[in-house]
Image (tube, helix red, strand yellow):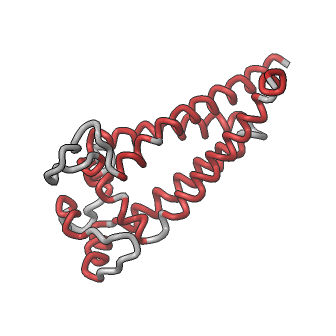
């Protein structure tokens, strides 16, 4: 078993690439749907790196909490607010970028230079996502009277975000493997 595991690392890294691709293509594809687009607004609105991408028509992104739809809920005035704030257009662009990063990671199986960029972009995207732990109040359990709130109590949104530490590590491994493949090709 040890021998098998030791000699299968390259195959496992390819499996990691496929896994990253599946996650990125799926999540990126979901960004085309309103419920997913609306769900990212708290992260984007509170991010110093991304908040400028909303509020395209003078709407007030600070009031996003007043315009939240529950997943699957349709509230026409909330949809109009999201349209005015550029939520859907931003989400379409973000989804496309995420899916393209996933494709670059997958192509790294055959093209290490593309895979290197895919790994770097995956790590970079994950770093930005992890910054939401600092910038987004919704990642912590709010104080609603119970004893378990604020740090270290992650909300559902926080538990979703913290998992990106795994994607950050995976991106670094993918970039490292691609760099190793490029160096080996240059030696030959």
Query: Would residue 55 be found to the left or right of residue 94 on screen?
Result: left
Which image quadrant for residue 37? bottom left
Which x, y percent locates residue 14?
A: 73, 38
Query: Would residue 83 be found to the left or right of residue 179 on screen?
Result: left
Which image quadrant for residue 79? bottom left
Which quadrant would the N terminus be assigned to in this image? top right
Query: Would residue 113 be found to the left or right of residue 46 on screen?
Result: right
| Name of the residue lying farthest toward the front | 147
Which quadrant would the C terminus be assigned to in this image? top right
Which image quadrant for residue 185? top right
| Name of the residue lying farthest toward the top | 187
| Name of the residue lying farthest toward the left | 145
Which x, y percent locates residue 53?
A: 32, 56
**Closer-to-camera residue (177/111):** 177
Seen in the picture, residue 177 relative to 41 is either above or below; the reply is: above
Identity of the residue drawn at 22% across and 42% down: 150
Seen in the picture, residue 23 relative to 64 is either above or below; the reply is: above
Looking at the image, how many numbered discs can be counted on the residues?
A: 0
**Closer-to-camera residue (93/4):** 4
Query: Would residue 15 be found to the left or right of residue 81 on screen?
Result: right
Identity of the residue drawn at 25% across and 80% down: 77
Identity of the residue drawn at 73% across and 26% down: 182
| Name of the residue lying farthest toward the bottom | 76
Which x, y percent locates residue 149?
A: 22, 44
**Closer-to-camera residue (93/171):** 171
Identity of the residue drawn at 41% across and 69% down: 35
């Amino acid at each position: 078993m040890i021998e098998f595991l030791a000699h299968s690392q390259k195959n496992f890294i390819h499996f990691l690439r496929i896994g990253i691709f599946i996650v990125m293509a799926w999540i990126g594809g979901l960004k085309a749907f309103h419920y997913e687009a609306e769900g990212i607004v708290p992260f984007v609105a509170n991010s110093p790196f991304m908040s400028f991408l909303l509020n395209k028509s003078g709407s007030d992104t600070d009031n996003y909490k007043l315009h939240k739809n529950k997943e699957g809920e349709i509230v026409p005035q909330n949809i109009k607010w999201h349209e005015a704030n550029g939520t859907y257009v931003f989400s379409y662009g973000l989804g496309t970028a995420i899916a393209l990063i996933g494709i670059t990671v997958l192509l790294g199986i055959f093209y290490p230079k593309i895979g290197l960029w895919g790994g770097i972009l995956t790590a970079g995207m994950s770093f930005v996502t992890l910054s939401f732990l600092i910038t987004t109040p919704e990642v912590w359990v709010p104080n609603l009277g119970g004893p378990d709130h604020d740090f270290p109590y992650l909300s559902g949104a926080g538990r979703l975000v913290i998992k990106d530490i795994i994607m950050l590590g995976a991106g670094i491994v993918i970039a490292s493997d691609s760099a190793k493949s490029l160096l080996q090709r240059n030696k030959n």
